[in-house]
Amino acid sequence: MSETRSVAQVYHVELGPRSYDIHIEPGCLDDLGQAMGKLFASPTRCMVISNVTIAPLYMQRLRDSLESAGWHVSECILADGERYKTIETLGFIMDALMDAKLSRNEPVIALGGGVVGDMTGFAASCYRRGIPFIQVPTTVLAQVDSSVGGKTAINHPHGKNMIGAFYQPKLVWVDSMVLNTLEPREVKAGIAEAVKYGLIRDAVFFDWMNSNMAAAIDLDADVLSKIIHTSCRHKAEVVMADETEQGLRALLNLGHTFGHAIESMTHYSTYLHGEAVAMGTLMAARLSEQLGFAEPGIESQIRVCYEAAGLPVDVPAFHADAWLDAMGHDKKNVGSRIRYILLRNIGEAFLAENVAPDAIRQLIDSYQSVH
Ligand code: NAD
Ligand code: GLY
């Protein structure tokens, strides 16, 4: 443990029998084994699921921590990338769990970003009808968003995250120091998901992010700490109020209806998730202005913020039919309607159920789509 280590902060996600803590502390990766003593009567077997990029960086440290606390550790190492968030990879994880003979009370630990976390959580929800799982998020995006809240999933060729479950972790263990090895582009994509909390429910945080963006993408420890803490607090509050997305939680999907379409139309190979969400958010802001829900100027305010973060802001050109088709497959739709999260103001989002397809065509036309 480093002597310069900051004080740990814990946020409790109260969900009755599915409650858990989010523990945030720089350097805490080395302490997970010890912490698991509070969750499990005695250490037995566990499996760490990670990928070929992250495992060489952090698996040994995590393994040392677990083994020194008495755990017998097996590993399951996945290929790296969103394109492997598939049913085939899920099968690979299931084979590993069967081979390791994990019983119903023995945990899996997701060591990775949102892809590893979403897949591990889904595997944990299915294997033996549900085993405990722990999130050790290693990307900005996973530390500010995906590791909290229990959305787990894999992709289907017809759409992203189409096969999944709400399945809460037993613990989220956040060590911001592991972010130091992350590619700068990944840092920026994660920042987009943190900005989202400002846009939907915290205008003060949005302004603060704007003022501190250079330090944020430079991973300044104090700025990063505030971003992770504020994001986890917001995420926990939203999940506690609406665990299974009956209302409030849908607001966290700001930018995602358009963003998922961008990812799908570009075959998940051009933009990172957070980048697509950033462009999707700009589209949602423009639509909010176009429909008269927001005063003109919101889109440009958000654009300035994303530009400072080095995020892409030029929405790719596709025909309106391609957009509508791609969004028609979005799992958040109810019946044939497409739901949009729109903005009334910075810090105030709402769910719009009945946006006419013509309004979407007008929006797409405003980007002068050509093909
Ligand atoms: P990711 O998991 O693909 O990680 C990004 C890249 O960074 C990968 O190449 C990974 O190997 C690498 N990496 C991870 N940690 C590293 C580290 N510490 N050092 C060096 N490299 C590291 O991407 P992501 O942005 O973390 O997650 C995106 C996924 O999260 C998408 O599939 C998205 O659907 C999902 N998501 C889920 C939720 C949710 O609530 N469950 C929310 C938002 C996004
Ligand atoms: N990231 C969206 C949600 O957790 O609901």
Image (cartoon, helix red, strand yellow):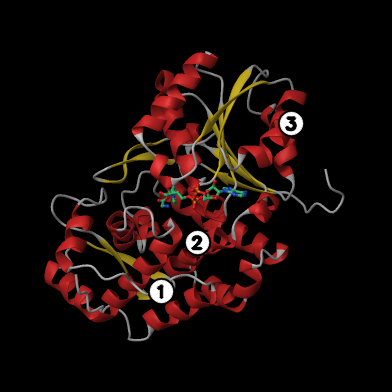
Q: Secondary structure at mark 3?
A: helix
Q: Are marks 3 and 2 in contact (CB under 8 Å)?
A: no
Q: Using the image as rendered, state which of residue 355 and residue 311 is in the foreground.
A: 311
Q: Which residue is mark 3?
A: 65
Relative image position of residue 293 (x, y in whole percent) = 27, 78
How far apart in space, not on screen, are marks 3 and 2 (Cα)? 30 Å
Say above or below: 125 vs 156. Answer: above
Is the residue at mark 1 in contact range of ligand 1, meaning its CB lies under 8 Å from it? no
Q: Earlier in the sequence, mark 3 or mark 2?
A: 3
Three-letter amino acid code at the position of disc 2: Ala
Residue that badge 1 annotates: 313
Earlier along the polypeptide chain: callout 2 or callout 1?
A: 2
Pointer 1 local density, CA inside 10 Å: few below 14, some 14–19, many at least 20: some
Task: From this view, report whether residue 136 is shown above or below residue 257.
Answer: above
| Quadrant in the rendering for residue 29 | top right
Could you tell me residue 150's position as x and y percent?
A: 45, 41
Q: Amino acid at mark 1?
A: Val
Q: Residue 102, can we see it?
A: no
Q: Is mark 2 within 8 Å of ligand 1?
A: yes
Taking the image as shown, residue 218 lies to the left or right of residue 203, namely: right
**Vertical side of 51 occupied by 322: above or below:** below
For marks 3 and 2, give the one nearer the viewer: 2
List the residue tagged with mark 2: 189
Task: Give the residue at x 54% y 19%.
Answer: 105
| For residue 213, side relative to residue 311 (left or right) | right
